Image: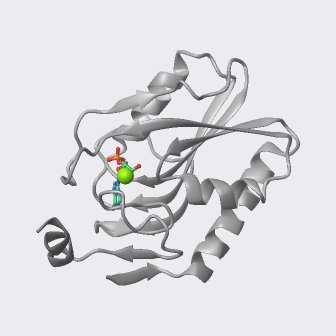
Amino acid sequence: MRTLITEKELNAGVNRLAAEINAEYGQRPLTVLGVLTGSVVLLADLIRKLNMPLRVGVLQARSYQGATTTPGSLHIDADMMPDIHDRDVLIVDDIFDTGRTLLGVLNHLDSLKPKSVKTLVLLNKQGRKEVEVEPDFYGFSIPDQFVVGYGLDYQDHYRNLPFVAALEPKEIDQLLS
Ligand code: IMP
Ligand code: MG
């Protein structure tokens, strides 16, 4: 496992993202929606640095099933979400990879008639995009590698690492055997 983004760099990145969100919305009330489970660490760190009247909610989106790192079909569970009708909404997710998750979430929220929706991700993976949308805000651009830590998992492991690390293909094989 090779560290890609250190704890200190993550902290600086989240500070910068928070400053961008504070500048964007000023004192307008905002609803932040974390996409479970990968966003939880970023969500906790980010919301404590936001200055506007804030509501926080979560929804679940799953696109990767089982051991595979190629996307399956997207399942969205929005039962836990607060009402977003006529609200300014910021979706927070861990990583933009193919973009299918964010697109699916955006399509779902659209039917609930929010006032506005913007998207924020910690990591923007290069060279994998399969959709037209892009995140409005992102912390770090990373190469096409499988990463874990700071909320990101490999088969539900490593979310608790305080840094972001790249998993080598042979390490993935070892974990599978
Ligand atoms: P997308 O729909 O292809 O953009 O994938 C987004 C979701 O896939 C993320 O929210 C993650 O849960 C997962 N994912 C994509 N790339 C990685 C990675 O490198 N490490 C861990 N999870 C990833
Ligand atoms: Mg995941």
Lateral position of residue 151 relative to residue 125, left or right:
right
Decide: is 63 above or below 84: below
Camera sees residue 132: no
Q: Is residue 132 above or below residue 17?
A: above
Taking the spot 56% from the left edge, 53% from the top edge, the residue there is: 40
Residue 41 percent coordinates (x, y): 58, 60
Q: Position of residue 145 (x, y in %)?
A: 28, 68
Side (left or right) of 175 relative to 91: left
Q: Quadrant of the N terminus?
A: bottom left
Quarter of the figure with residue 175:
bottom left
Residue 115 appears in the rendering:
yes
Q: Is residue 36 above or below residue 103?
A: below
Residue at horizontal 72 percent and vertical 19 percent from the top: 86
Quadrant position of residue 32: top right
Q: Is residue 15 left or right of residue 29?
A: left
Q: Position of residue 79 (x, y in %)?
A: 54, 24
